[in-house]
C-alpha cells in the first residue's frame, strides 16, 4: 500500500454492470479501508473522473476534496506545443 503519509491509495475499482447498485463497491471500499487501517494506514483516498457514474456513491461515502487537481507525467508524452 502506498500514498501520502498515513493514507492508502485505492488505485482502481470496477464493479461489473450486472451487479452494480447492490452494495458491492461500498463493501469493497469499506474492506480496503479496514485492511489499510490494520496496516497502519488510517486514511484511504482515490481519484475519479468528474462525470463518472460512481460519483454519486463516492460523494455519499467519501469526502470530496474541492480544488484538488490531479496531474500525471510521462517523459515521452508531456511535450507542450
Image (cartoon, grey):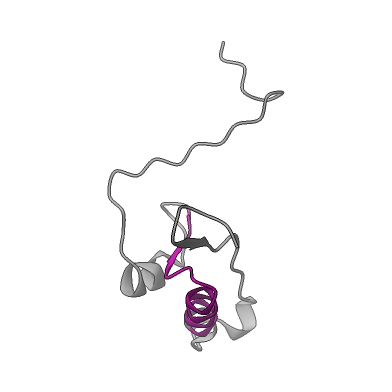
Say which of 20 and 26 sits in front. Answer: 26
- Rendered position, 30 above or below 55: below
The vertical placement of 26 against 54, above or below, is: below
Tell whether position 64 is magenta: no
Residue 46 horizontal/vertical position (percent): 48, 59
Q: Is residue 38 inside the magenta stretch?
A: yes
Compared to 73, does 61 lie above or below? below
Q: Residue furthest front?
A: 40
Q: Quadrant of the C terminus?
A: top right
Q: Quadrant of the N terminus?
A: bottom right
Compared to residue 35, the image places residue 53 above or below, namely above
- Can you give x and y, in whole percent of width and height, for residue 28 in the image? 55, 80
Q: Is residue 55 left or right of residue 9?
A: left
Which of the 4 image quarters holds residue 75? top right
Q: Start and end of the magenta stretch?
A: 27-48
* Residue with the most extreme right position: 76
Amino acid at each position: 500500500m502506498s500514498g501520502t503519509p498515513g493514507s492508502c491509495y485505492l488505485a482502481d475499482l470496477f464493479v461489473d454492470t450486472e451487479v452494480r447498485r447492490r452494495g458491492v463497491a461500498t463493501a469493497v471500499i469499506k474492506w480496503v479501508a479496514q485492511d489499510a487501517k490494520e496496516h497502519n494506514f488510517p486514511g484511504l483516498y482515490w481519484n475519479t473522473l468528474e462525470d463518472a457514474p460512481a460519483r454519486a456513491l463516492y460523494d455519499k461515502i467519501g469526502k470530496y476534496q474541492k480544488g484538488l487537481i490531479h496531474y500525471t507525467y510521462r517523459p515521452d508524452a508531456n511535450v507542450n506545443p
